[in-house]
């Protein structure tokens, strides 16, 4: 009998969105409408599509999407000025700078310019450090999505060996930190790793974050492993060779329809949380005035 758990990202994303709807309605009653500002620099078609998808997802839920589209020729300073204005704008709760930005722009400097309380995409080094220390408010969205899926399907990590394939700052590294904070024993692999198949043979949890289609093969997987595939390659193909890995796995995310949809819902969740925090801060500040 087929006894596989397919980790359906659309189900998880809908669950998150239903919860958010209530919170957004509550915020609106107190005069606050969550707002995510997206900054797109240049005309890269994929980036344009991603930003549009994120903006549309916001609007569908009642989150304001403030879309800023800057010319590909702008200097780093101009981008920094735009970010500084958004940092100062009390109506904006989250800021997302779509990456990659054109090569002449100092992307790291731009990310670092985002105020920590508005870093809903988890791109600042301060946010990453807080995530690694275990008190980060808004981890990078794809790692957050991976944990959200595990939580929804009640898949614990405590004591398990998690092997993360990939070590990028937005994915491999933060998801390794998050799993470590959940008491997994974490091995983070990368392009210099030797004997990757043997390491994967020991994995109870496999996180695929490589960016290479069908890279992880079923024969490398331990019977009964949990596989979360963050990969998204041309032609809607994941980093995991689905058919062979599905045979070995206890639980697996499909691509598409796995980690991807949950990633967007994490961006929405973080934006709503940032709006709630901003409201509380304002209420606390107001309550300090004594009326006579
Ligand atoms: P990235 O920055 O290109 O990082 C890829 C990582 O894979 C690097 O750490 C690299 O190692 C490692 N790697 C490359 N070849 C390897 C090999 N042969 N063996 C072991 N490790 C190897 O990519 P990313 O931004 O993290 O994205 C990874 C994947 O996730 C992509 O498919 C991307 O489209 C997808 N993604 C999906 C979402 C989503 O919402 N679902 C969001 C973000 C990214 P080195 O560090 O040594 O180079």
Image (cartoon, helix red, strand yellow):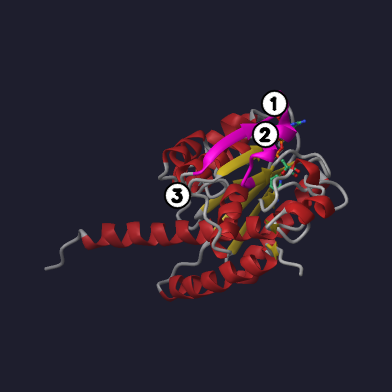
Q: Which mark is residue 199?
A: 2
Q: Quadrant of residue 102?
A: top right
Nearer the N terminus, badge 1 or badge 2? 1
Asked if residue 197 is among those painted magenta in the image, a careful observer would answer yes
Disc 1 versus disc 2: nearer the observer: 2
Extreme residue toward the left, this view: 292
Query: In the image, is 212 to the left or to the right of 131?
Result: right
Residue at figure coordinates x 23%, y 62% from the top left: 287
> In which quadrant is the N terminus drawn?
bottom right
Q: Residues within 10 Å of mark 3 (few under 14, many from 20)?
A: some
**In this view of the protein, can residue 97 be seen by the observer?**
no
Closer-to-camera residue (204/172): 204
- Residue at mark 1: C-beta within 8 A of ligand 1: yes
Asked if residue 63 is among those painted magenta in the image, a careful observer would answer no
The residue segment tinted magenta is 184-205
The residue to which callout 1 is attached is 193
Q: Position of residue 224 (x, y in %)?
A: 67, 53
Mark 3 residue element: loop
Q: Are marks 1 and 2 in contact (CB under 8 Å)?
A: yes
Residues at marks 3 and 2, CA–CA distance in whole angstroms: 32 Å
């Amino acid at each position: 009998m087929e006894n596989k758990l397919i980790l359906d990202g659309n189900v998880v994303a809908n669950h998150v969105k239903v919860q958010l709807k209530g919170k957004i309605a509550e915020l609106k009653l107190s005069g606050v409408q969550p707002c995510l500002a997206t900054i797109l620099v240049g005309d890269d078609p994929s980036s344009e599509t991603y930003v549009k998808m994120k903006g549309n997802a916001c609007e569908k839920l009642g989150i304001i999407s403030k879309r800023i589209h800057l010319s590909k020729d702008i200097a780093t300073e101009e981008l920094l000025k735009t970010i500084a204005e958004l940092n100062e704008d009390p109506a904006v709760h989250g800021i997302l700078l779509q990456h990659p930005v054109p090569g002449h722009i100092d992307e790291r400097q731009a990310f670092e310019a985002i105020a920590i309380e508005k870093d809903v995409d988890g791109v600042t080094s301060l946010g990453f450090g807080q995530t690694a220390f275990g008190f980060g408010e808004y981890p990078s969205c794809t790692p957050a999505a991976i944990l959200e899926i595990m939580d929804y399907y009640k898949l614990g990590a405590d004591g398990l060996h998690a092997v993360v394939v990939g070590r990028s700052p937005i994915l491999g590294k933060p998801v390794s930190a998050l799993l470590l904070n959940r008491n997994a024993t974490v091995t983070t692999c990368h392009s210099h790793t030797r004997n990757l198949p043997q390491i994967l043979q020991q994995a109870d949890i496999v996180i695929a974050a490589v960016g290479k289609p069908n890279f992880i093969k079923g024969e490398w997987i331990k019977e009964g492993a949990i596989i979360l595939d963050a990969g998204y390659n041309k032609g809607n193909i994941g980093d995991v060779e689905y058919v062979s890995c599905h045979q070995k796995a206890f639980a697996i995310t499909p691509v598409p329809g796995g980690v991807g949809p949950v990633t967007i819902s994490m961006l929405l969740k973080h934006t709503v949380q940032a709006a709630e925090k901003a409201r509380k801060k304002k209420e606390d500040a107001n309550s300090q005035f004594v009326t006579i």
